[in-house]
Amino acid sequence: MKKLVSLAAGVLLAGLPFAGSAFAQDYPTKPITVVVPFAAGGPTDTVARLVAEVMSQDLGQQVVVQNVGGAGGTLGAGQVATASNDGYTLLLHHIGMSTAPTLYRSLPYDPTADFEPVGLITAVPMTLVAKKDFEPNTLEELVAYVKANGENITYAHAGIGSASQLCGMLFMDALDTQMTTVPYQGSGPAMTDIIGGQIDFICDQTTNTTSQIQAGEVKAYAVTSPERLGNLPDLPTTAESGLELEIGVWHGLYAPAGTDAAIVERLEAALKTALANETVVSRFAELGTVPVSEEEATPEALAETLSSQIELWRGVIEEAGVYAD
Amino acid sequence: MAVSKFETKDLVSGCIFVAAGAYFALESLTYEIGTAFRMGPGFMPLMLGTALSLLGLAIAANGWNKPDSEEAPVWPWRGLILIIGVIVFFGATIRGLGFVPVVLVSSFVAAMSSRLNSPVFAAMLAVTLTVMCTLIFVVGLGMSVPWFGPWLPL
Amino acid sequence: MDIIASLGLGFSVALDPTNILYCFIGVLLGTVVGCLPGIGPTATIAMLLPITFSLSPAGALIMLAGIYYGAQYGGSTTAILINLPGESSSAVTAIDGYQMAKRGRAGPALATAALGSFFAGTVATLLLAFFAPPLARAALNFGAPEYFALIVLGLLVSIALAHGSILKALAMIVLGLLLGMVGQDIYTGQPRFTLGFRELYSGLNFVSVAVGVFGVAEILRNLENEKERDVMVKAVKNLWLSKDDIRRIVAPVLRGTALGSLLGVLPGGGHILSSFASYSAEKRLSKTPEEFGQGAIEGVAGPESANNAAAQTSFIPLLTLGIPAHPVMALMVGAFILQGITPGPNVINDQPALFWGIIASMWVGNVLLVLLNLPLIGLWVKMLSIPYRALFPAIVLFACIGCYSINQNIFDVYAIGVFGVLGYVLIRFGCEPAPLLLGFVLGPLLEEHLRRAMIISRGDPSVFVTRPISATLLALALAAVIIAVLPGIRRKRKEVFVEED
């Protein structure tokens, strides 16, 4: 019964209006909205909800996740860019924050100028997986096979600007070959066709692939993180097999530009608490990822990652000639 | 509207389809068409737009020589203007004015679009609906809109 | 047998008093949000996700699942009472359900929906329990060519949705297909028909289009000539089904359940087709097809059963393979992960209590829904005695609020207005809205699967006929066209003859 009451209270709290302006020193005095620019239930949303839950406890105010999907994450990000910079509207975005300025030639906001970075959260590694009866068995064989068969291989990705598309670009870049890329609407349908053997190969986040790899539904070749993963100890890293392909889907927390420094500091502290939380660490581990270190959960680290990643992806995307508008 | 030897219904709906089809087909010409084997974003809309226009022509032609058998109903101008007005007003102001004022005004105007409703009845209905909607959507379902928006000096 | 033991384990979880309570909260919330247009199960589950943190995994997932299939139940209520479908599945129910309500038969319509859904839910639960893994495996044989063929079949068979001119129905389907293409092309990212608005990149919202062409258009029609007729309902005749009604709904419910159960398993959009397919099938098989669209009870019984069966079996790919079939299932994946369980093929072995508990809870939930909904029928029908002039402003408001709440996107609100007018004008000139909606939901799928099939086959169109499943489906589609065209031509001859007489 107690749970029922808290449930009702939760529903009520999420909707209650709060008036009046807040001063930075007693921030926060009302619920904070974290905009996730993707649909609920996806990997980024999951990361956001895990972190938001613990941040709520630390800040003493509800941190509400709001999903504003559409246009490859640029709608939600654009909304936060123009939101009031009072610290009550934040953005949790992934690697797409750094690819959007190149992918979208008419982006209505500037990822560096329109946001105050708060901190990095995590970098989800990716895995190279293929349908069960795909010929190559190891990464070396895969590389040779892809080089030999090129466009006869079908590569699935989860849509324009998705992590799997980016990883595919890097992979083809590293091998200097082209495969036939087949876009899907999200990771779910793409994985369905990999498991069903309708399509050959994908590089996707561990969030989506780990359970399928463990169950033997797909053939896994390598993980793109520098170290092997705890829950897939037999899976080699790309570096071990001599492939230069390192990519992680990094997530960051942002506030609109001009947010009071004291508020950013408070948020940074809450973020650090959340990333040190046991539940968050263990749930992240099940997703095949770890929270970033304390030094990285800072505005400086996020700002640096963002600007270096923007540069990196500008090169890769322009070379591939892939644009989203 | 006995314009011609066409049945009005067929003629007008046919024309709408032709116009809509033409819009989609012409607009899709500005996208990459591709080939049947490697379709671009313009391929399907071009095909379908053309098909729609042809269907529209066939529908209009089908009405040839069939004089209207029934009287056309009157246009509900008052309802059309007020209800569409309410929807546009709702969309344009929900973020600025907030939930309560927008719902209050919208339901009053929507009620006024029926000639059977007096202003007093409409006002009563507006108050009832505002209370009800606020309770259901904002309090009950936790919809994230402010009661009163930033445009109001409260 | 093994399965009996497993089901026993499942029921021991599902019948735990706290879990019954969560199940009840879930189906109750689902019914409520299903009734309201806009705020669908997706939004509700998203809002409740954070709260489920504090619950046990079984309790949380039982509740969230309850919201989903509860909403399928509730969705039919507003479709029948005020012609306001909240979801693609209930758009079909609105066709005949609303006509029944207008003729004073809202009670039997609602009862049919509830009973049909309950029966379908029970069968689908059994299917889930006994055949989930093999069904999921079979569904994996469906690739892009098969889905394309299935959608073509669905579209061609659905011309039966219209009760007027076939040409106009075809045109409405094509217009719907085109409207479905508004937004960013998923293959190239090219924004199409967005008129430069970034808000339209993810396309038009289904609920806005449906609420516009059904709900708002109907209101405008009723405002045409207010003085002469009072629009709403004649005196309510009876609340319950007559013996004749029961006789008439048995076969449609059985067929709807079978169709829905099978289509629901397909992760690539099968559940969307289920209610449309069932409606078309019933109309084809009926001895009195002219009654469809005028309040045929079969037109409510079939689609409602199909839709609820599909809602239930669409859990199969998720529970057995970890594959989400549609956005609500994707949310369920999120819910699993938040509970520390990654959905995948291993769940059935690693978490048997959870797996079987969820399945058993679905049946419990269906019982709760019937117990909840049957007594409500009287109340709903009473609502119809509110004069229409007071009811319609509420409908307009609910439509605006509901659509806005989905994505906080004001374009979704404007779209109601645009499609309200478009729907009204088209209806006025003799076109019906249901085929347009069907085209709208299937358009993006049709294009997606066609283009994907062509890419994977490297431009070889023979894939559609060399793959056995797709070849069979296309052959069925061809047969459907032939069957539809032949009597059409014959009737046409008769008509011409009569006119010249």
Image (cartoon, rainbow, N blue to C red):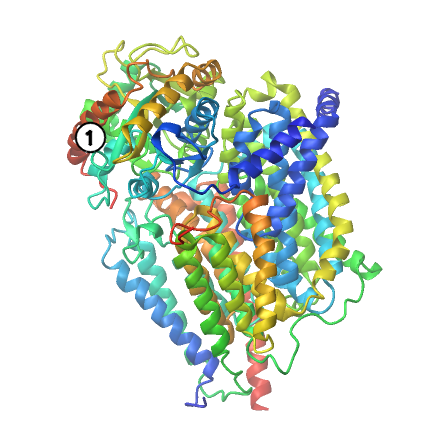
Residue appearing at x 59%, y 52% in the figure:
C36
- In the image, residue B11 sits, relative to residue A162, either above or below, namely below
- At label 1, which amino acid type do we have? Ile
Q: Quadrant of residue B17?
A: bottom left
- In the image, residue C321 sits, relative to residue C407, either above or below, namely above
Kindly tell me whether residue C438 is visible in this rendering.
Answer: no
Q: Is residue B91 left or right of residue C431?
A: left
What chain does mark 1 sit on? Answer: A
* Residue B102, percent from left and from top: 47, 58
Between residue C126 and residue C37, name the one nearer to us. C37
Between residue C228 and residue A24, name the one nearer to us. A24
Quadrant for the N terminus of chain B in the image: bottom left
Between residue C398 and residue C120, name the one nearer to us. C398
Residue appearing at x 24%, y 31% in the figure:
A98
Kindly tell me whether residue C255 is visible in this rendering.
Answer: yes
- In the image, residue A226 sits, relative to residue C156, either above or below, namely above
Q: Which residue is mark 1?
A: A310
- In the image, residue C269 sits, relative to residue C341, either above or below, namely below
* Residue B37, percent from left and from top: 29, 47
Residue appearing at x 29%, y 45% in the figure:
C189
Secondary structure beneath dot 1 equals helix
* Residue A235, percent from left and from top: 37, 11
Residue appearing at x 61%, y 54% in the figure:
B132
